[in-house]
């Protein structure tokens, strides 16, 4: 399993000012949750004992995979504070469950691997992430049957997201 995780903003960052103007308290507009990138890691938490799963949810982890675009071993610089707060809450909850923790079924989830991954991950700016994405795109050109269709699907997905968020932003304004 891979234990990289990203912070996901409940309200998209570009819509937070609009949400606040519409009456949503700033604390709610800025809420984030930590999401693992690897579906297998999320699957392990879903199969783990309820106590284990509840600790992660209470600490601020969500139970869906999501990728910010940061490569393995890196995270978005802007996520530093949220990552630290989430891991501190998880640490507190693990300490509180101390006597019982070794008897729980973790379904293969390795808490030490998570803490190691957290401790060794490095921040990456948006500009560095963009450069990394562009370099990856140049390295791995789509090829083989359906390559043109893959590009068309990616473009369509991007445009659909743009239209949805663009319309949502207009409706909230």
Image: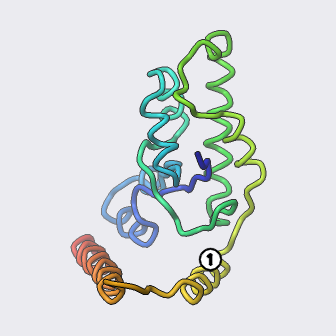
Q: Image height check: is 22 above or below 167?
A: above
Q: Position of residue 29 (x, y in %)?
A: 42, 56
Relative to 157, 17 lies left or right: right
Q: Nearer the viewer, residue 50 or 23?
A: 50
Tell me the residue that label 1 is attached to: 129
The colour scheme applied to this rendered structure is rainbow
Q: Position of residue 76 (x, y in %)?
A: 63, 66
Q: Image height check: is 2 above or below 104?
A: below
Residue ranking furthest to the top: 99
Q: Residue at x 71, y 48 (%)?
A: 117
Q: Image height check: is 27 above or below 161?
A: above
Relative to 170, 70 lies left or right: right
Quadrant containing the C terminus is bottom left
Residue ranking furthest to the front: 144
Q: Position of residue 152 (x, y in %)?
A: 30, 86
Q: Nearer the viewer, residue 30 or 74?
A: 74
Q: Image height check: is 121 above or below 47?
A: below
Q: Residue at x 33, y 84 (%)?
A: 145
Q: Residue at x 50, y 62 (%)?
A: 67
Q: Nearer the viewer, residue 169 or 121?
A: 121
Q: Residue at x 54, y 55 (%)?
A: 7
Relative to 153, 34 lies left or right: right
Graded by Cα atoms within 10 Å as few (under 14), some (14 to 19) or many (20 or more), the crowding at tag 1 reads some
């Amino acid at each position: 399993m891979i234990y990289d995780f990203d912070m996901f903003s409940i309200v998209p960052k570009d819509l937070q000012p609009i949400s606040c103007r519409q009456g949503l308290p700033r604390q709610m507009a800025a809420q984030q949750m930590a999401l693992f990138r690897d579906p297998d890691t999320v699957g392990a938490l879903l199969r783990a004992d309820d106590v284990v799963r509840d600790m992660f949810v209470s600490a601020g982890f969500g139970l869906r995979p999501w990728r910010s675009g940061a490569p393995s071993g890196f995270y978005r610089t802007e996520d530093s504070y949220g990552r630290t707060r989430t891991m501190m809450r998880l640490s507190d909850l693990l300490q509180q469950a101390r006597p019982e923790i070794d008897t729980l079924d973790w379904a293969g989830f390795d808490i030490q691997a998570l803490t190691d991954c957290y401790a060794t991950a490095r921040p990456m700016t948006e500009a560095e992430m963009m450069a990394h994405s562009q370099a990856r795109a140049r390295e791995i050109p789509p090829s083989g049957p359906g390559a043109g269709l893959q590009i068309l699907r990616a473009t369509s997905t991007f445009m659909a997201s743009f239209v949805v968020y663009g319309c949502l932003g207009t409706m909230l304004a």
